[in-house]
Structures are given as structure tokens and as C-alpha cells.
Image: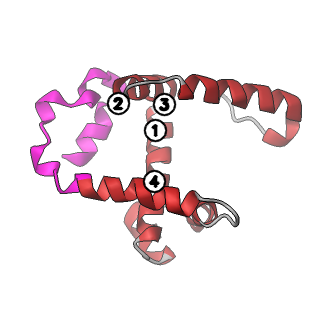
Amino acid sequence: MSKVNPYQIDSKEKYIVINDMFEVISGLKTKKEIVDFFLGLFTPSESLMIARRIQIAKMLLDEENYESIRKKLGVGNNNIQQVDRWIHREGSDYEKMIKNKIGKLKNKEGSKKYYNPEKSLLDKYPYHRFIKNLFN
């Protein structure tokens, strides 16, 4: 699928399409449904790009500097700035929400010793096995 320039699409059409997407996402009930939906919808590259943004947010909230993030993740300053603006968007609760969600991720990191690679959800998706291999 080719990239779409959001400025060339009618604002009413954008609203309808994005609204439909969020209606579908908000209807997902279980973690399995969410994983199946996103791994089926996104290419491996898109999955990794979104996951990297979460890692950038996590590192920014840990007060790591741009240079450190850039070197560790191999991302550009523009990506880091975009995530930084998203976290600190004025008049929003993004920072609080993200800190809450990323705090839960950090708590789960302590339980990584219980990870069983034999039962990984990523094994179910042949074209996403490379993600599992990144962690090995």
C-alpha cells in the first residue's frame, strides 16, 4: 500500500475513516483479539515502528536524552521529537496516561524470567517471528 498524504484527503472523509478504525479497535475485548487484529493489520515493519515509538516514550519518561535514544534505538531526532511532543502535548493527559501505561510495562519487566518462548503468541504469526527472534 502506498503512503497517503493526509493533506490531500477531504477532512470529512478522514474523520469517517479514522472514526471507523477507532470503532473497530474499541470493540476488541481481549488481549488475544487485540494482538490478532494488529498483527494481522500491520506489516512487520509497521509493528516495529509503532513499538519503537513506545520505547522512545519509555526512554523519554526515564529522562534519557535524545542522543542516547538515537544511538540505542537507531531512530532519528524527528521521531524522538514527535513522541516528545505527543507525551507533553499541552492541555492533555497524555503524559499521565503514558506514565501509567509504561509504569505497568516496567513492572512486567521484572517478570520476564517467567517468559516461556514455547508458548509465545508471536509463534502463531509466521511473518512476525522475526520480532520474537529480536528478543533472543
Residue 49, given in percent of the width and then of the height, sits at 49, 46
Residue type marked 1: Ser
Magenta-highlighted residues = 108-136
Circle 1 residue: 47
Residue 19 location in percent, x, y? 71, 29
Residue 1: image x %, image y %? Answer: 64, 26
Label 4 SS: helix
Please, what secondary structure does the residue beneath circle 1 have? helix
Disc 3, SS = loop
Q: Is label 3 in contact with label 1 (beta carbons under 8 Å)?
A: yes
**Is 15 placed left or right of 108 in the picture?**
right
The answer to whether one can see residue 55 in this image is no
Residue corresponding to mark 2: 128
Mark 1 vs 2: CB contact within 8 A: yes
Asked if disc 2 and disc 4 are in contact, CB closer than 8 Å, the reply is no
Q: Is residue 6 left or right of residue 30?
A: right
Q: Which residue type does callout 3 highlight?
A: Thr
Q: Secondary structure at mark 2?
A: helix
Of callouts 4 and 1, the N-terminal one: 1
Q: CA distance from mark 1 to mark 2?
A: 9 Å
Give the residue number, with chain letter if any, for mark 4: 54
What's the amino acid at mark 2?
His
Residue mark closest to the camera, 4 vs 1: 4
Q: Earlier in the sequence, mark 2 or mark 3?
A: 3
Residue plotted at (10% across, 50% down):
113
Quick check: 44 above or below 110?
above
Please name whichever residue, 9 or 84, is drawn nearer the observer in this view of the structure.
Answer: 84
Asked whether the residues under the numbered discs 2 and 3 touch, taking CB atoms below 8 Å apart as contact, a structural biologist would say no
